[in-house]
Amino acid sequence: MSLKRTEMVVAWAGKLATDYVKDPVFTRGTSNLLRHNLLCCSPRYAIRDDTLSNHPRLSIEPTRVVLEGVPRVHFYEGGKRCPEDFTFPSSLRACLEYMGESYGCEHLMEPQPIWQLCCTYAYIMSACGYAFSLSWRQGWHMDNNSILFMSADPDEPFRRAFQAVGHGHEIIRKQEGYNSEAYFRRRIIESIRDKRCPVLGFGVVGPPECCIITGYDEDGDALTGWTFFQGFPKFNAGVEFEPSGYFRKKDWFKDTHSLIIIGQKQEPPPRGELYRGILKWALEVARTPVVHGRSSGVAAYQTWAEHLLRDEDFPVEDKDVLRERHMVHDNSVGMVAEARWYASIFLSQIARHEPGMAEELLAAASCYAAEHDLMWRIWGLVGGIGREEPKFMKLAEPSVRRQIVPVILQAQNRDAEAADHIERAFSRSS
């Protein structure tokens, strides 16, 4: 069973505000030529960067700059584009599309992808290692599969992702005893106003997951952007919305954990070298059994299964606890289903470019695709995808959980087999 598809409208449009100081709006299209030569564009205006830089009014710094046309990121809603439920890879993919640097999508017509890889999201998921990851901390925790705990070095997934897409980057975190808010604000403004480049933030609206900061208002007192969580009442108290749909959030710093500034375009390593680096990283992610005290990679499946056998963790009279248990479990089902599906896509793409590795890579891709199908079997045992009461009550039944455990262990075997195939692919390519 394949994943459903989703629709993403990638729009480029903009204007030069009549009063530049009051309401300037910077717009970047998908065309590289336009991106370098136009600061703003509308049917009536086509104004070059150098024209604006000499404009006498630019001596007054704008209080508002919003980059219009950054693609929306969100949990799956149906449509042509496949699900993208992991916030960092999806947010980086959207920023690349905005900057005219897509790596392709087989379901959407995109102008001049850098490499026709069929799926930019699969490329980023694999480059950062998420496509091969699984994690479980003892107990029941919603952050089990956070990208921040995927590697012993929490910055490593981001470093690898930006290397793969040919950009520098800078991670900025809050520092105790330092005026981090002023520094965060200055870096956001510099990126958006001076480089017309979105910023990735963790938090801002909702939990410390990745979002896109697309602009600022009132000299940075308010930020605009997209987050996966802006439509959830639990997270959007006090949040306003722009006509474009962007969130608009004041008093944002307290909910912002860190930033990633997208750096200058760099030359990525040669394609073959880059692919081998990603595959080597995939093996490390899959075969490292413990990271930050959490069961990781192939070993995490066993820990997940063991938790489902703890009948005392499923008190039938406490629906709040049962709902939480189901959410943690379901996060891992979704993690494996989506991540391994994209791993299979990426390995199939590499196989087309690396004939010496193709047989083993396609065998690994088949293992990952099988894991995706096994997760659908698990969903079926609780009544399907979703987190409604009938589903979490179904998971509370010991007999149902004892049917799920063997399926998880089958997936673990497929994951280990996939890693073995990837390792053999290296030996055949040397």
Image (cartoon, rainbow, N blue to C red):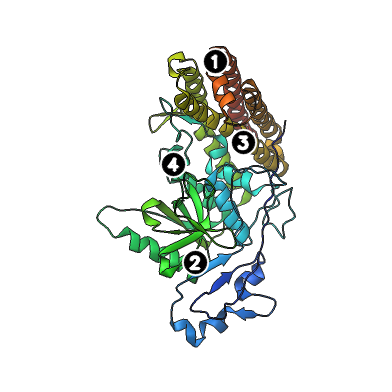
Q: Tell me the residue that label 4 is attached to.
A: 148
Calculate the distance from the C-alpha at mark 2 to the C-alpha at mark 4: 25 Å
Q: Tell me the residue that label 3 is attached to.
A: 338
Q: Tell me the residue that label 1 is attached to.
A: 397
Element marked by disc 4: helix
From the viewer's perspective, is the residue at label 1 or at label 2 nearer? 1
Calculate the distance from the C-alpha at mark 3 to the C-alpha at mark 4: 18 Å
Query: In the rendered structure, which disc, 3 or 4, sits on the residue that comes first in sequence?
Result: 4
From the viewer's side, name the closer residue of 202 and 224: 224
Residue kind at label 3, given as amino acid type: Glu
Calculate the distance from the C-alpha at mark 3 to the C-alpha at mark 2: 32 Å
Q: Residue at the location (44% across, 67% down)?
A: 189
Calculate the distance from the C-alpha at mark 4 to the C-alpha at mark 1: 33 Å
Query: In the rendered structure, which disc, 4 or 1, sits on the residue that comes first in sequence?
Result: 4
Neighbour class for label 3 at 10 Å: few (<14), some, many (≥20)?
Answer: many
- Residue 309 horizontal/vertical position (percent): 49, 15
Query: In the rendered structure, which disc, 2 or 4, sits on the residue that comes first in sequence?
Result: 4
Can residue 429 be seen here? The reply is: no
Neighbour class for label 4 at 10 Å: few (<14), some, many (≥20)?
Answer: some
Q: Is residue 96 above or below residue 77?
A: below
Query: In the rendered structure, which disc, 1 or 2, sits on the residue that comes first in sequence?
Result: 2
Q: Tell me the residue that label 2 is attached to.
A: 192
